[in-house]
Amino acid sequence: MAFSLSVYSRNSLLLPFLTLFLITSSRANFLQDFDITWGEGRGKIVNNGQLLTLSLDRYSGSGFQSKKEYLFGKIDMQLKLVPGNSAGTVTAYYLSSEGQNHDEIDFEFLGNISGEPYTVHTNVYTEGKGEREQQFRLWFDPTADFHTFSFLWNPQTVVFLVDNTPIREFKNLENIGVQFPRKQAMRLYSSIWNADQWATRGGLIKTDWSQAPFTASYRNYTATSCALPVNPGQASCTSAPDNRPWKLDPVSQDKLKWVQQNYMIYNYCTDTKRFPQGFPPECSV
Ligand SMILES: *[C@@H]1O[C@H](CO)[C@@H](O)[C@H](O)[C@H]1NC(C)=O
Ligand SMILES: *[C@@H]1O[C@H](CO)[C@@H](O)[C@H](O)[C@H]1NC(C)=O
């Protein structure tokens, strides 16, 4: 646990104000910090809370959620995705608030037949509205070993990271009328389910149930967050856990560019068929 003092000014025209806040960093124990919420025994916490596994068979998937809610922070988890023929399985790993007009920040891992690459699907919802998909390939096999998938979320930006390489940034562009998730606290969720209708190009490839159960594994969860309660909108957690400014440093910006140029396979901002009336405003920034 670390204590930290930070000055935060939302608007230089307003009186800058001092905010004292608490950054908590916790290396999790799954038994203490998560609840398996569905799947009747298909989700398991083992090794004294150090490892969590979720499985899917032809009858059901499974899922878990964090006990804590976060309003901004950096959330890291190491995941090892379903190996072998995982076509039709979807492992969702996301932050979400509750209710109809919820905010959500998503990773979804779409399985594939043996030897073919996963798709990493990402999206950001604000007050119930998403439709901001970007999809990626990975530069490694995510089923061979554990890799770290992270969310960096503060009032100015949402960054998706893979092994600390940023793959996507969704900036706060409220100044040009783009809604940004910053008013609702979120929990971390993960689940594994079957979506062969959606995930395999409209049901082209069926899930091979003879390979079931399909299992994804989780370890080494770390959440570095501003402690609640924080007044919604009066954001206080402006810096990365090590107190660097939130802005991506030049090296990270280069990495982001590298991923976007080489591994991005879908971007809503270039999908003209979908937006015949013109792209959402954030696409032209
Ligand atoms: C599975 O692999 C094929 C061939 O590389 C690719 O076209 C397809 O998009 C992949 N499917 C998923 C769900 O990633
Ligand atoms: C656990 O994650 C932290 C950062 O989130 C990393 O520094 C550490 O090396 C990881 N531990 C293992 C055993 O991979």
Image (cartoon, helix red, strand yellow):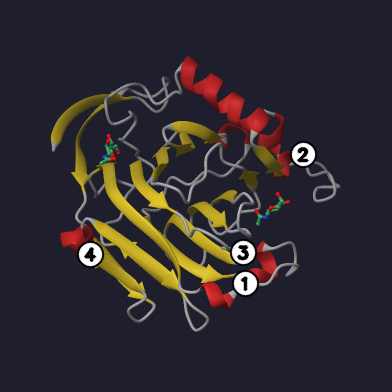
Provide the residue designation for mark 1.
207
Q: Could you tell me the amino acid type at mark 1? A: Thr
Dot 3 and dot 1 residues touching (CB under 8 Å): yes
Provide the residue designation for mark 4.
46
Disc 3 Cβ-to-ligand 1 distance below 8 Å: yes
Q: Residue at the location (67% across, 28% down)? A: 261
Q: Nearer the viewer, residue 45 or 94?
A: 45
The answer to whether residue 253 is above or below residue 233 is above
The answer to whether residue 284 is above or below residue 39 is above
Nearer to us: label 4 or label 2: 4
Q: Position of residue 30 (x, y in %)?
A: 23, 59
User: Is residue 10 toward the left or the right of residue 113 in the image?
Assistant: left
Q: Position of residue 131 (x, y in %)?
A: 66, 53
Q: Could you tell me the amino acid type at mark 4? A: Val
Q: Position of residue 225 (x, y in %)?
A: 27, 42
Element under disc 1: loop
Label 3 vs 2, first from the N-terminus: 3
Q: Which mark is residue 87?
A: 3
Q: Residue at the location (55% across, 77% down)? A: 210
Q: Position of residue 61 (x, y in %)?
A: 46, 74
How busy is the neighbourhood of tag 1: few (under 14 within 10 Å), some, or many (20 plus)? many
Quarter of the figure with the N terminus: top left
Provide the residue designation for mark 2.
270
Q: Nearer the viewer, residue 80 or 198?
A: 80
